[in-house]
Image (cartoon, rainbow, N blue to C red):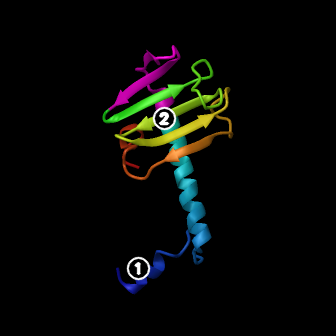
Amino acid sequence: MDARNRALAFVDDDGRWATLSTMRRRRNRNRLELALRIREAVLAFPHWRIETTHLGTEFMRATIGELEIVRTTPATPDFGAPASNGIDIWAGRKVFSMWWPDGDVDDDEFEIVAFATGDWFAPLVGGC
């Protein structure tokens, strides 16, 4: 990359120089938007299997390509986690975990517990 292109890489969308903090905020906002798209895609998935743990707790599981997805609801609590909605995704290892309170999924209250980098999410939301 030549000097001009290196300099342009640090110019913000409005033409001002991007500081490290603005670049971090933009990256975090993009990851937040992607996390919400992942949640929407998982919630829209129609093919869930109901499984039972050795303790008798039921949960929903789905497989999409190489991804294993577990979805919990307040009716299917996870020991150690609050009684809330949750999504856990594995691609060989856990790559995504999100929890939000019972109620409307449009609520602004949610917690991203894990969000691994990589392109593992492509089967859910496309190429991004």
How far apart are the alpha carbons under marks 1 and 2? 39 Å
Write down the residue under mark 2.
88
Q: Earlier in the sequence, mark 1 or mark 2?
A: 1
Instruction: Tell me the magenta residue range.
Output: 41-64
Above or below 75: residue 5: below
Q: Secondary structure at mark 2?
A: strand
Q: Is there a contact, CB below 8 Å, between mark 1 and mark 2?
A: no
| Quadrant, the N terminus | bottom left
Residue 10 left/right relative to 118: right
Residue 3 percent location from the top left of the image = 40, 86
Amino acid carrying label 2: it is Asp
Say which of marks 1 and 2 sits in front.
2
Q: Residues within 10 Å of mark 2 (few under 14, many from 20)?
A: some
Q: Secondary structure at mark 1?
A: helix
Residue at position x 56%, y 44% from top? 113
* Furthest-front residue in this view: 55
